[in-house]
Image (cartoon, rainbow, N blue to C red):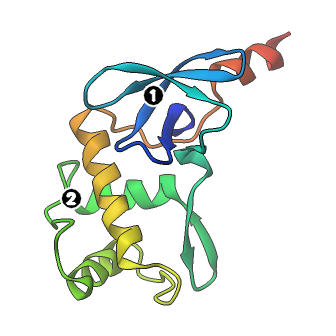
Amino acid sequence: MLNNILSISGKPGLFKLVSRGRNMLIVENLTTGKRIPAYSHDKVISLADIAMFTDEGETPLSEVLKSVKELENGEVAKVSGKATAEDLRKWFAQVLPNFDRERVYPSDIKKLISWYNLLIEAGITDFSVGKDAEEVETTEE
């Protein structure tokens, strides 16, 4: 599911991939439902391609989101994005105990909380990384 959820640099919130066009993507804002184009010059990244630094390497965002969901019992995160850096790190240590404390900044944790809350409020609770529709079509031929 996270393959079709996108972050676009310079645009607030998260977007769902609706369609692919020539030199652009059609995306839908998860909060407002408004559809907009994302052009080839926009920095677009799928949540499935993001990972968090740990002491042993990296942990995919899908695993981190599953841990947050388990900690928060599938509800909106109780910690605020406006919490102090120390509080954010304490909360994140419950989610990912071995996170790299030098490379994961409080701003990264705030963004994770924001994204998690947006996904939960949009009714997206499946944080798996599966094949998207285009990949499925090519493998079935």
Label 2's element? loop
Which of 74/84 is in front?
84
Q: Residue at x 61, y 71 (%)?
A: 58
Q: Residue at x 68, y 32 (%)?
A: 40
Q: Position of residue 13 (x, y in %)?
A: 35, 42
Q: Quadrant of residue 118?
A: top left
Earlier-in-chain disc, 1 versus 2: 1
Q: Position of residue 72 (x, y in %)?
A: 21, 58
Residue under numbered circle 1: 16
Q: Quadrant of the C terminus?
A: top right
Q: Residue at x 46, y 88 (%)?
A: 101
Marks 2 and 1: in contact by CB < 8 Å? no
Q: Is residue 43 above or below residue 91?
A: above
Q: Residues within 10 Å of mark 2 (few under 14, many from 20)?
A: some
Residue under numbered circle 2: 72
Q: Is residue 68 above or below residue 40?
A: below
Q: Name the residue type under label 2.
A: Glu
Q: Quadrant of residue 55?
A: bottom right
Q: Position of residue 15 (x, y in %)?
A: 43, 33
- Cα separation between marks 1 and 2: 24 Å
Q: Name the residue type under label 1.
A: Lys
Q: Position of residue 74 (x, y in %)?
A: 23, 48
Q: Residues within 10 Å of mark 1 (few under 14, many from 20)?
A: many
Q: Is residue 59 left or right of residue 7?
A: right
